[in-house]
Image: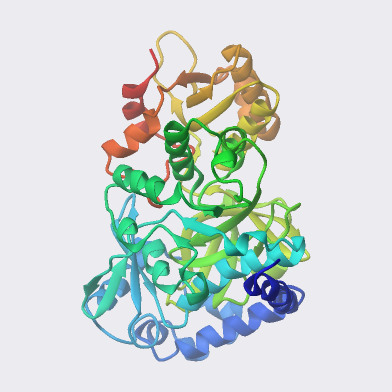
Amino acid sequence: MKSLKALLAKPFAKYIQKKISKWANNPIKTQEKVFKKLIKQAAHTAFGKDHDFENIHSHADFVKRVPIRDYEALKPYVERVVAGEKDILWKGKPLYFAKTSGTTSGAKYIPITRASMPTHVDAARNAILCYIAETGNTDFVNGKMIFLQGSPILKEENGVKLGRLSGIVAHYVPKYLQKNRLPSWETNCIDDWETKVEAIVDETLPEKMAIISGIPSWVQMYFERIQERTGKKIGDVFPDFKLFIFGGVNYEPYRSKFENLIGRKVDSIELYPASEGFFAFQDKQDDKGMLLQLKSGIFYEFIEATTFFDENPTRITLKDVQVGVNYVMIISTNAGLWGYNIGDTVEFTSIKPYKVIVSGRIKHFISAFGEHVIGKEVEYALQEALQNANTSINEFTVAPKIETENQLPYHEWFIEFEKEPENIALFAKAIDASLQQQNSYYFDLIKGKVLQPLKITKIQKDGFQNYMKSIGKLGGQNKIPRLSNDRKIAEKLTNYKKA
């Protein structure tokens, strides 16, 4: 017999799905309303006055007055907010700062306001409700749920609480989920990631786990610890495990490893959350595109990635985007980020409704020879090769190898195999062929003998985890870049080469 919670979940899910459909089916008007509201509400802030918000009536007006900024360029305003000033980027003071580790800026303090906080919580909830509305599956609502995340312990700076986004969100778990949710508060507060994972395994092993959520690489670590302890597949340890929710990186390179660890297929939902906003979630099981959140206090602009570094790249709004083009996503939000480059690139898979996939990072590419290979291309190439080989991987990253002795330069792929391919040369050839097919510049460089085909460097078991530990970034929301245009990561990974 179904519980009251399970019975109520279906009608509530259908109600939320209808609400989402209203704005998803009226996207341009929805974004216009968001834009006008943002400008009006921030007109009397320091940023609004400095950029003449009073005279912004259109997107063209906005482009004239508000340049594209990354965190470094917005930092003078953020520092005033951190110092305790009010009405700087948004009305009043923020509720929180989400602290993230920037690669160039050191620590970043991303404001989260009274207006923006609910959108982070609602989008995550709505992703699950859309799944229920589509599948009718409510079996998992009475089981236990785990969200692998950062510590919920928050510090305070000039009256504003400070912590990791996932730790902040932990304070907003609805009451009806509190009893179902793991890990415990005490375990969640453990700082050391390896100690924390062991404690999570202790807590979850006796429970009926139904939903497991987190960045794939760290969920994999949790699954491996369970398998080491029990000698069983995850699906046998947790027969009620029905739904895997993930974000942060593409799941496809991990899929075969996960299905092997679990022992069966489970449904999955992809999310696109960030400290700067919750941008999209997968609303259909048979569609990998994620529904762009158009009514969440975020106004979106897009710049074609190939023109992003031009002097005056064209900024377009939703109505002018095209399917299959690689765009840098620019946001303006009710947390006080304006014309803000979060660094992500996206591609639209659909414009009715507007759905995206994350194609990479604008700073994470390889173009040491003019090839401009992006994250989406390397992930797809690897995925294709994995489908045709009896092999699985744990982790990978790619870097250019420019200085070589008496041979052409090449792209070096660092791969930690769970199960090595029978013929590593054929596997490398398959990846390279896919890359050449996807990227005409790369094809020309190989054909013109400027580059030689890629080479694979095998990394020892747990090599990537040990590397992340060595730089103090093991666990939580940290993830390794898929590709780099230099050898900084590559040089350190050579310490973990398989003999």
Question: Which residue sits at x=71%, y=81%?
Answer: 29
Residue 70 % position (x, y): 41, 62
Q: Position of residue 173 (x, y in %)?
A: 46, 71
The extreme top residue here reads: 406
Residue 64: percent from left, percent from top = 52, 76
Q: Please state which of residues 393 and 84 is positioned toward the viewer in this rendering.
A: 393
Q: Nearer the viewer, residue 117 or 107?
A: 117
Q: Residue at x 54, y 29 (%)?
A: 393
Q: Quadrant of the C terminus?
A: top left
Residue 21's place in the image compared with 188, above or below, is below
Question: In the picture provided, is 489 more to the left or to the right than 438?
Answer: left
Q: Quadrant of residue 71?
A: bottom left
- Quadrant, the N terminus: bottom right
Q: Is residue 97 above or below residue 86?
A: above
Query: What's the coloring here?
Result: rainbow
- In the image, residue 463 above or below residue 319: above
User: What residue do we see at 56% from left, 46% from top?
Assistant: 238
Apparent side of residue 163 relative to residue 391 in the rendered image (left or right) = left
The location of residue 50, given as percent across then percent down, is 38, 83
- The answer to whether one can see residue 478 in this image is no
Q: Is there any visible trace of residue 442 in the rendered image?
A: yes
Between 400 and 65, the one lying in front of the other is: 400
